[in-house]
Amino acid sequence: MIRAYDEVYLQPAQDNMAFMLDYAVNDAGFTIEDFFRLFIGSRFARRFEAGDYMYITGMSGIELAGRVLEAAGMAYRIREPRIRFHRTEEHWTGWILAYYQWWSALTFREIEETIGITGIRDMYHPYHEMDIMQGIERIDSICRKETRLKNMRIRQGLSQSQLARASGVPVRTIQQYEQRERDINRAQAASVAALAAALGTESAYLLENHADR
């Protein structure tokens, strides 16, 4: 997949999104839904998605919040944020949102129309304590209609490599089933049974109803 900007800029982009949402909610007094709606409606969301360095590295998240409010016609004077001794839920939401948008190449609007910004924030417990890719895969399973195999694997907190080790099914084969490059309904019964056993479910659960896609 071709991504909008190089991974070297991902951390600054995550920081900017994190501090923007944190500031908007915890200092400027907006709800996360209302502010994110303003952000999506602004030109800044599209420029952020496109990897415009002015917005992912050229200004702070707090400055970006001010630009969004100004573009929405709101006279708002940016003030110093309050000192916080821990990362807020909104900070984590922005941090993982920026990563997911970069990783998936979906637009912020598409993400909002599927899982929603509050849906991501509600994942804070327990995902803020997990490896970021577990959160990313969980968001992705909601934003895109995924295979039962992938949904069950994510629900169990397993990576593809961990499932491969537990089941004896090659990781590449698991990837092909999850990406629908191979049809799990036509897989060898032993392979499906091994995957099901590793996931603590029945083989029939992993088979797909193609009419539901």
Image: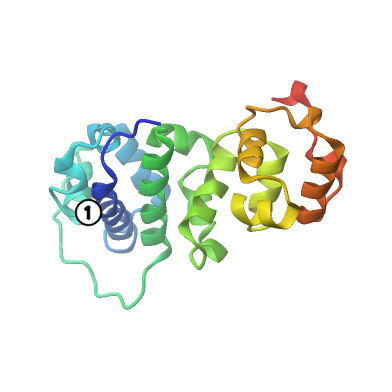
Q: Which residue is mark 1?
A: 61
In the figure, residue 191 lies in which quadrant?
top right
In the image as oriented, which residue stretches furthest toward the top? 211
Q: Amino acid at mark 1?
A: Gly
In the figure, residue 158 lies in which quadrant?
bottom right
**Which residue is pictured at 71% across the width and 42% down the height?**
149
Image location of residue 28, percent across then percent down:
27, 58
In the figure, residue 143 lies in which quadrant?
top right
Q: Does 127 appear above or below 8?
A: below
Image location of residue 159, percent across then percent down:
59, 54
Q: Does 143 appear above or below 201?
A: above
Say whether residue 150 is visible.
Answer: yes
Q: Residues within 10 Å of mark 1 (few under 14, many from 20)?
A: many
Image location of residue 102, percent across then percent down:
36, 41
Image location of residue 25, percent across then percent down:
34, 58
The reply, left or right, for residue 44 in relation to residue 25 is left
Of 130 and 86, nearer the camera is 130
**Which residue is pictured at 80% across the width and 29% down the height?**
185
**Which residue is pictured at 32% across the width and 60% down the height?**
22
Q: Does 212 appear above or below 146?
A: above
**Which residue is pictured at 28% across the width and 32% down the height?**
46
State the SS at label 1. helix
Count the marks. 1
The reply, left or right, for residue 14 in relation to residue 113 is left
Say whether residue 70 is visible.
Answer: no
The C terminus: image quadrant: top right
